[in-house]
Image: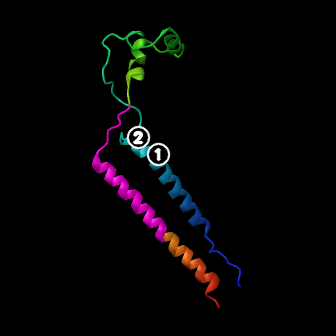
Amino acid sequence: MAHYKPPVQSKVSQLIDVIVLVTLTVGALFVPLWLHMAGSSKTVASPVATPTWEALGQNAAQAKQYEALGYTPESAHDLILARFDYSFTVSALVVMIVVIVAYYVLMLRFSEVEYRDVIAEKFDEK
């Protein structure tokens, strides 16, 4: 039985692979932020007209820590009262499900082709 020798990939091809993978990784991390689809809340549900530490629901110890970080009640207002928006649309959910299922099917198909090629190289020489 012959020893399996995987195909050799050129240096240029390896460089292209790295560039594509880094681009996809950066894209996956930053595109949702650029499209305002992720990140913290941008609005405050019920803003306080004249914010004080007490009106923002902060006790003396919390207020002292905010002040140590350089915040005033006015500058910490949005930071303290902002809440995450957990709403979603059904169409976005369906698109995400389709993308995940398509990726899974694609990976299974590619894996099957690769697996069959390796088995054919290894055992079909008889």
Q: Secondary structure at mark 2?
A: helix
Looking at the rendered image, the quarter that the N terminus falls into is: bottom right
Picture disc at residue 29: 1
Look at the picture and state if 86 lies above or below 126.
above
Is residue 100 rendered to the left or right of residue 125? left
Tell me how many marks there are. Answer: 2
Looking at the rendered image, the quarter that the C terminus falls into is: bottom right
Give the x, y percent position of residue 117: 56, 79
Q: Amino acid at mark 1?
A: Leu
Q: Secondary structure at mark 1?
A: helix
Q: Tell me what residue is drawn at x 43 percent, y 18 percent.
A: 76
Residue 97 vs residue 70, the one in the foreground:
97
Q: Quadrant of residue 4?
A: bottom right
Give me the C-alpha separation between circle 1 and circle 2: 8 Å
Picture disc at residue 56: none
Give the x, y percent position of residue 67: 50, 12
Residue 85 colored in magenta in the image: yes
Q: Are marks 1 and 2 in contact (CB under 8 Å)?
A: yes
Q: Main secondary structure of the magenta part?
A: helix
Picture disc at residue 33: 2
The segment highlighted magenta reads 84-109
